[in-house]
Every structure is written in C-alpha cells, then in structure tokens.
Image (tube, rainbow, N blue to C red):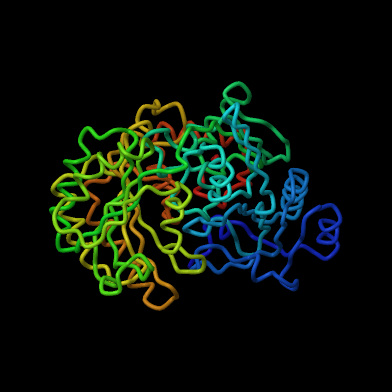
Amino acid sequence: MAMTRSAEATPTRRPGPTAVAGLRRVLGGEVVGPADDGYDAHRRVWNGSIDRRPALIARCRGVDDVRAALRFGRDQQLPIAVRSGGHSFPGLSTCDDGLLIDLRQMGGIRVDPDARTAGAQAGVLLGELDSATQEHGLAVPAGIVSHTGLAGLTLGGGIGWIQRRYGLTVDSLLSADVVTADGEFVRASQDENADLFWGLRGGGGNFGIVTHFRFRLHPLGPQVMAGATFWPMEQAASVLRRHRDWLAGCPDELMTLVVQRLAPPLPVVPHELVGRPVIAVVACYAGDVEEGERVLRPMRDFGSPVLDLFASKPFLAHQQMFDPSFRHGCWYYVRSCDVAELSDDVIDVVVEHGRRISSPLSSIALWQMGGAVARVGEDETAFNGRGAGFTFNINGNTATADGFDEQRQWARDYWSALAPFHTSVYVNFLMEEGDARVREAYGEAKYQRLRTLKRKYDPANVFRINQNIRPD
C-alpha cells in the first residue's frame, strides 16, 4: 500500500538519540523505537495490507503524555499519526518515518447509570464500552465490530446497530477533551468551544487529539432480538425487493444490513453451506424482544432461506457477530457510497456484482439509514449525508497478499457500477482517495466551514495523516 499523501508531502528526519532520551524521561508511558523489543507488534494495525514503520511510537498513559509527545513531534518536525484502535481502513492511524502517538493504554471507562452518562478515554474499544454500559442495561450507539476503536469511529460520525433508534455516536456525544495542535488542553461541548464541538462530530482527527469522550446513554437490552437469515445468492433479486418493501414504514427500533458473501466457516453455519454464495438480512431490534420477533417474521419467512440465526440474545453477543469476518491482520480494501434508495437499477447492480464474489473474506454490507439519524438537522454536526437511504460498504478482502489485487479490483468495479446512484460517502469508509472525495464526504458548504475551523485550530496542518481538511 502507498504511503499516506501527507507523509509524502513532508521531508522527514530521524530524531537523534539525545532528543529520544529526553522524550523517554518525560513520558509516563513507553517510547518504542525500531531497535526496541515489541516494535513490530506495536507498529501493526488492524489492516494487514498496511505495513508502515514509524520512527518512534509514543505509548501514552494520559493527557500529559499526549502533550509531551505532540510537543516532541512538532519540535522534531516529524509527521504525526494518532492511533486509538488502529481500525482505519487506509491505515491513517500510523505512518512511515514519523511519530505514532498511541492512545491504546488510555482505556478508562466510567459509567453513571443514574445520570445515564459514560466517560471513556480515547484508547477504549467498542466492546469494552459496551461491556461496561450493558451491565446497567444502557448503551452508546456505536459500530458493529467490537474491536473497533471508539475514538476514530466517533470522530467520523459513528454508524451502528442502534442508530435508527438513538442516532449516530456523535448524536450522543456530550463533550470531548482535546489537545490542540499548539499543545493546549481544551474541552468542547455545546456550551464550551461550540465551534470545535461541531467539527469534532464528523470532522475526524483534523482539529486535535481527543483524549476523553463523555456520552449520553440510552436504555437497551441486555437481551435483543437479533441475528440473520440467509438465502442462496440466486435469490438475491427477489430478497432485495422483498427487503425494500418490508422496510417501508418500519419502526425506528429496526436496523438492518444486507450482506453478500460466501457463507463463512463458523460453528453456527452447516458444513454443506460453507463457501456457498449467499445473501443475508442481518438485523437488530432495539426494543421489546417479542415485538422484534413480530416485526422480523415477514422477512425471515420470505422465499427459501437456507439458514435462520435470529434469536433473543445479549446485545453484547450480537455486537461481536462480525468480529470473525474482520480479524486483525487480514488484508482489507473498501469502497463506499451512499444512495438515496434501493431502486430496481441499484438492485440490478447488487445482483450482478454479488455473484462475482470469490474470496471468503470479501463482502458487501448495505446499511439501512434513516430513523433518528435523519431527524438531526444536517447543519447541526459536521457529519454529512443524514438524508441517505442506504450506505454501501464494499469490502475486497483476503487473508494474505494472495489474491488481494483481484479482490480490490472487484470492489472498485462494484463501486463504479453504482456511480450513477452515488449521493455522498461516509468519511470512515474512505480509503486514500484524494481531496475531491473528502470534499464529497462533507459537501462543499460544510467542507468550507470545516476549513475555516481547521485554520483556527490547526493552521499548520499538524494533524494531516487523516482524511485531511487542508487549511490552505
């Protein structure tokens, strides 16, 4: 994979031993360099196709460490990457020949069930937050893979299983603690640095390093009606049309993904089905379990399903359903777009390209949008595309480098076939696709507002290893 464009744009030099020794003295956490034990383990990110070698890794334990590391990186004129969970598809949570500020050790969580709020440090993973909040029958709307980093997901917007009832992750964000490019510590909320708070809710890591999030919590579970029904891929056209009709007027408690893939080798999948092309409707009903059973039944009973995995289950279990399909170290490539509706023409593209899946790890997930997501004003947050009907996530994946080029091309071809129907794109589903695609993710008016904010908080573009909003 290519180096990030931001790293390419900046000449770099290796920090000298005296400077590195100085950082080791002031950092409460660990400084790891190429010659140190554990360097290879610490430099790895989730996407195995990303193989970058930072000059140094600063494993921070708290805000003071973050400020010290940032000061060091600026003084040494190093490119600076920031990692929480390291789940960035294009590998924008690491860099070559720069400073990686690693927040994973900052994993504190505090839940106040009476106030229905939760505080979480920037190194927290979704599964860790879910475990803490579900003890009280509460949840933060978040993603669908439990080892995703909370910080990156939140700063891009945060779509997930309960978004249609409770909105995006950013819609539950109450405040964020931020270390800005000049090393200042500030808090952003509706009442404090409101312009920054607006930009953090969808604008990614462009404006500073968020060290702590405070969220509003919502009642959920702990049991939910959730799972998946699978049909042979040959029935894709009829399943998609049934799905479209079934969703008309559906309650906000229902959230669905349509998945195309080869049936995975999991214990719940019969041996004779493994490797066969299938289309599935995966869903979570964020409400009464019996009501969820009633709402889901018309879809589950349609056609000739080959496997039905819906059941009343802990929300925590459902949140881990996709974990085996997105393991650490596999090779991942994604193309994405929003579409207004699941029209017959869109369905034709889905049917045609779904039958071409050849890797056990390649898939598409067609996210249902709407509900509470669409009821937040488009200008209230930096997140764009609240009016989208569906979001495509097209994954061309392999276990190793073997066959990766072919799967990447399959994802590109699928995405290109959908081009007449593109409306926008979710910024967290972008690869490194250039400035024009970043602009598309926000729309021109919102992008210009974000540029103004960038000029205020990071005029030198210190935080540029991201889906970058350039200040100039």
Q: Give the image location of residue 368, x and y in percent.
A: 30, 43
In the shown orientation, is residue 390 left or right of residue 171?
left
How many marks the image carries: the answer is: 0
194 and 86: which is toward the camera: 86
Q: Relative to 382, is 418 above or below?
A: below
| Farthest residue, direction bottom | 402
> Would residue 152 appear left or right of 309 to someone viewing this image?
right
Near-viewer residue (208 or 352): 352
Answer above or below: position of 138 versus 350.
Answer: above
| Image-quadrant location for residue 457 | top right
Give percent across and percent down for residue 156.
Answer: 48, 43
Q: Is residue 448 visible?
A: yes
Quadrant assignment, res 20: bottom right
Give me the residue at 75% from left, 73% from top: 35
Left or right, residue 207 beside residue 172? right
Dividing the picture into quadrants, the one containing residue 342 is: top left
Q: Residue at x 41, y 56 (%)?
A: 321
Q: Quadrant of the C terminus?
A: top right
Residue 34 on image: x %, y %: 71, 71
What residue is rendered at 29% in x and 64% in y? 261
- The front one of 367 and 472 is 367
